[in-house]
Image: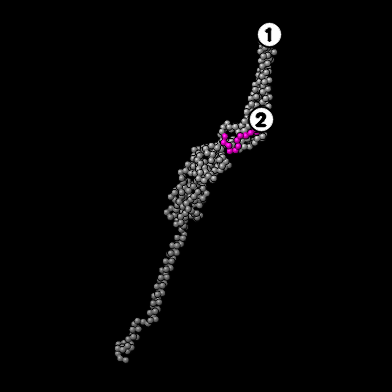
């Protein structure tokens, strides 16, 4: 092998070939592989430690975020200056009277029936009174007899007074005759009063309407026995109702009784007349709370010239009351009942704050708050029992429903 050929021993290398010397300088391939593996393992361990550290920090952040409760909030609704109070009611005729007979007898005829509109003084029925007629004839005969006795007593008393002047009769006899005259005069007056009484009873044979209205009931017929007066045996002949104006009595709850003042406007609606509104006014109140129902009896007057509203009908009365105080309305599930009293939780600067409130009216699903809240507050709905003032909270992005009555 000549010098300079590959694999030939190098004289300067002590007889070691050049390729061997190069391998010695660079090292063996196995060492390179071990080094690369060690470096890769180190890098993997470093990256794993970094990932673990980042995962731990993320876990801490997630845990801290999960510890902050997510709450739903609602804005209080400010109350209107006037309030509409809806109450059930029953219409009644402004004047409703039962027509009884003032004399006894038998019904001769009736001239009106149910639904008939009558005027004041109109004849309704006639009654036959044979007993009253007979009693009247007897009373007149007794009056004539008493009148004749009175005339005789006048003549006798005058004669005896004349004889007394000549001393033909005694003073005692004259006084007796004068006294008999006075007794006969009283008898005449008594019989005359009895005649007038029977004449009045006979005049009640004709039954007249006491006012304008509608006949709502007829409880008799021709030939029926009529008993005078409103005794237990008597029965009303007719029932007359004045329907040009109606009354509606409603019980205003004690909570709203201070706002129920005469003159308040009222509207009335009926289910059978949808869209039809009748307007009236709160005329008067009882000025006393019923201890049984805890309501204030109030009377509403409403004009009914067309007769479209019928007495006895069920109606819905809408009383428009001026509110003495204007609060806000929140859902009922926002209230918190604790030892400190009634409270509501609101969100302020990312934290919960428990606010004491004063409760007004209860509408069922919502309540009125008189003091403690404003329309700008964010009220927490369904607050947890562990919620305290200063606790951090996060508001849910899902909007809550507005409180309704």
Region of the chain picked out in magenta, as a range: 99-118
Is 143 situated left or right of 358 in this image? right
Q: Label 1 neighbourhood size at 10 Å, few (<14), some (14-19), many (20+)? A: few
The front one of 161 and 339 is 161
- Res. 286 visible in picture: no
Q: Which residue is mark 1?
A: 167
- Element type at mark 1: loop
Q: Earlier in the sequence, mark 2 or mark 1?
A: 2
| Residue displayed at 69% across by 10% down | 169
The front one of 160 and 112 is 112
Residue 62 screen position, x and y as percent: 45, 62
- Res. 74 visible in picture: yes
The way the protein has been coloured in the rendering is one colour
Residue 33 in the image: above or below residue 2: above
Nearest-to-viewer mark from 2 and 1: 2
Residue 34 in the image: above or below residue 101: below
- Image quadrant in which the N terminus is located: bottom left
- Element type at mark 2: loop
| Residue displayed at 65% across by 33% down | 107
The reply to whether callout 2 and callout 1 are in contact (CB within 8 Å) is no
| Residue displayed at 49% across by 42% down | 320
Q: Which residue is mark 2?
A: 129
Q: Is residue 3 magenta?
A: no
Residue 36 in the image: above or below residue 394: below
Q: Label 2 neighbourhood size at 10 Å, few (<14), some (14-19), many (20+)? A: some
The front one of 89 and 46 is 89
């Amino acid at each position: 092998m000549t010098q300079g050929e590959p694999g030939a021993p190098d004289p300067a290398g002590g007889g070691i070939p050049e390729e061997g010397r190069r391998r010695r300088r660079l090292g063996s391939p196995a060492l390179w592989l071990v080094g690369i593996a060690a470096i890769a393992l180190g890098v993997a361990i470093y990256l794993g430690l970094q990932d673990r550290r980042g995962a731990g920090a993320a876990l801490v952040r997630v845990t801290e975020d999960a510890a902050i409760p997510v709450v739903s909030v609602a804005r209080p609704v400010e109350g209107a200056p006037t309030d509409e109070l809806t109450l059930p009611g029953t219409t009644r005729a402004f004047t409703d009277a039962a027509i009884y007979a003032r004399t006894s007898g038998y019904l001769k005829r009736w001239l009106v029936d149910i639904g008939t509109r009558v005027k004041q003084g109109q004849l309704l029925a006639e009654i036959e009174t044979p007993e009253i007629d007979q009693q009247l004839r007897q009373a007149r005969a007794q009056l004539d007899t008493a009148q004749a006795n009175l005339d005789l007593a006048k003549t006798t008393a005058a004669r005896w007074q004349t004889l007394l002047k000549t001393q033909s009769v005694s003073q005692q006899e004259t006084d007796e005759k004068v006294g008999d005259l006075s007794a006969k005069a009283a008898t005449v007056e008594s019989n005359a009063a009895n005649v007038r009484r029977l004449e009045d009873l006979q005049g009640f044979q004709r039954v007249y309407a006491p006012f304008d209205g509608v006949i709502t009931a007829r409880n008799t017929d021709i030939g029926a026995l009529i008993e005078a007066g409103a005794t237990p045996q008597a029965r009303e002949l007719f029932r007359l109702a004045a329907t040009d104006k109606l009354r509606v009595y409603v019980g205003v709850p004690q909570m709203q009784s201070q706002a129920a003042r005469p003159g308040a406007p009222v509207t009335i609606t009926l289910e059978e007349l949808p869209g039809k509104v009748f307007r009236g006014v709160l005329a008067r109140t009882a000025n006393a709370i019923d201890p049984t129902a805890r309501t204030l009896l109030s009377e509403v007057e409403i004009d009914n010239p067309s007769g479209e509203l019928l007495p006895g009908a069920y109606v819905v009365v809408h009383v428009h009351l001026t509110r003495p105080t204007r609060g806000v309305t929140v859902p009922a599930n926002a209230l918190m009942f604790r030892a400190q009293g009634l409270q509501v939780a609101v969100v302020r600067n990312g934290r919960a704050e428990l606010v004491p409130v004063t409760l007004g009216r209860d509408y069922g699903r919502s309540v009125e708050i008189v003091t403690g809240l404003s329309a700008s507050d964010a009220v927490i709905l369904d607050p947890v029992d562990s919620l305290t003032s200063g606790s951090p909270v996060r508001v849910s992005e899902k909007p809550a429903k507005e409180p309704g009555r």
